[in-house]
Image (tube, grey):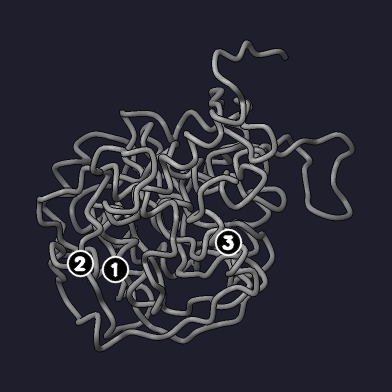
Amino acid sequence: MEFCHKIPRRRFIQTALAAGAALSLPRSVWPYEMESPRFLDERRRVGLAAQGDRAANVFNALKPFAEEIKVKIGDKLVLVKPNNVSIENQLAATHADCLTGVFEFLQSIGKTNYAIAESAASGPTMEGFSNYGYLPVAGKYKAKMMDLDKEGYQIVYVVNDGDFYPHPVRMSKWLFNPDVYVISAAVMKTHDRVVTTLSLKNIVFGAPIKDDGFRWGPGGKSGAKNDKPIAHGGGFRGVNFNLFSMASRGLKPDLAIIDGYQGMEGNGPVGGTPVDHKVAVASTDWLAADRVAVELMGIDFADVGYLNYCAGAGLGQADLSKIDIAGASIADHQKKYKLSDSIQKQLVWKQPMG
């Protein structure tokens, strides 16, 4: 495919990426004399639970939002999106007990039209559901089970570090559907490309679909394609920009849940090690939830590119002084997570293009 360039390619790359990176910088050092970013003034709430088992923590983190969530769901189908980046590593994936807490909460507010919906990254979605014990949970709560790889898609364009051309990606139409209420049931993990993966990333990079028969490693169907690597943008700048870009286009959770009962540190999202943290975070403002999770993990928020971009664009509340915590205290439950071995390379997003 050929593209007609109306501005020099190098200048386009510099301007587009620097515009995103600048959102996190003090006004005095912003490049290109950009306008100040639009930070939210509104206060937001985040539920933080740390006293029970995994399911109880999730339920209790959601309780402060019961009436708000009930109204917002209305008659919509509720899609509960777990994180199944791997279909064989429980530490990297949403636990069945987290889903139990979600469905107990939904039933407590009179909502029973729901589904567990995912496009697993490493192999067949339903295989992951089976490996992680989702089938008994779905049976108990009469939840539908949806393999998003087989439920239709729409084409969305993302960028790549290598050329910054628009690249088409097949993304699940369900996660863009305004008549669906999307819940991100994420895991608290560090990450080898974007520092940490929380509620937003679970939705954005769960949305790209793959062909039937795709599997990482041996055993996959010859020629089966996976669109998730395309969405990751080919580098540390592209991945942060694409996360921000997709969120700004409406690909984000309506309700964020981050299960940190047992988090992952080090070389996540798959190869890290466990952190016994025993917390759960929830909010109807996904960015506020992710911001609180970053604080709980002892991570410098200024290092997380895509969340800084989203904050600067006013996609949610990221100012801790404007976030009211319902439940436990952040200070009482902070742990310092070890970051990925690639952390210094990841921070290239802070630098202007050379």
In this figure, which residue is indicated by the disc labeled 3?
A: 346
Q: CA distance from mark 1 to mark 3?
A: 21 Å
Instruction: Locate residue 273, reporting x and y percent.
Output: 61, 81
- Camera-near label (2 vs 3) is 3
Q: Are marks 2 and 1 in contact (CB under 8 Å)?
A: yes
In this figure, which residue is indicated by the disc labeled 2?
A: 320
Q: How many marks?
A: 3
Q: Nearer the viewer, residue 29 or 39?
A: 29
Q: Secondary structure at mark 2?
A: helix
In this figure, which residue is indicated by the disc labeled 1?
A: 292
Residue 135 in sight: no
Instruction: Locate residue 18, reporting x and y percent.
Output: 46, 42
- Camera-near label (2 vs 1) is 2
Residue found 50% across the figure and 69% down from its top: 189
Badge 2 or badge 3: first in the primary sequence: 2
Q: Residues within 10 Å of mark 2 (few under 14, many from 20)?
A: some
- Where, by quadrant of the figure, is residue 260 drawn? bottom left
Badge 2 or badge 1: first in the primary sequence: 1
Say which amino acid is labelled 1: Val
Q: CA distance from mark 2 to mark 1?
A: 8 Å
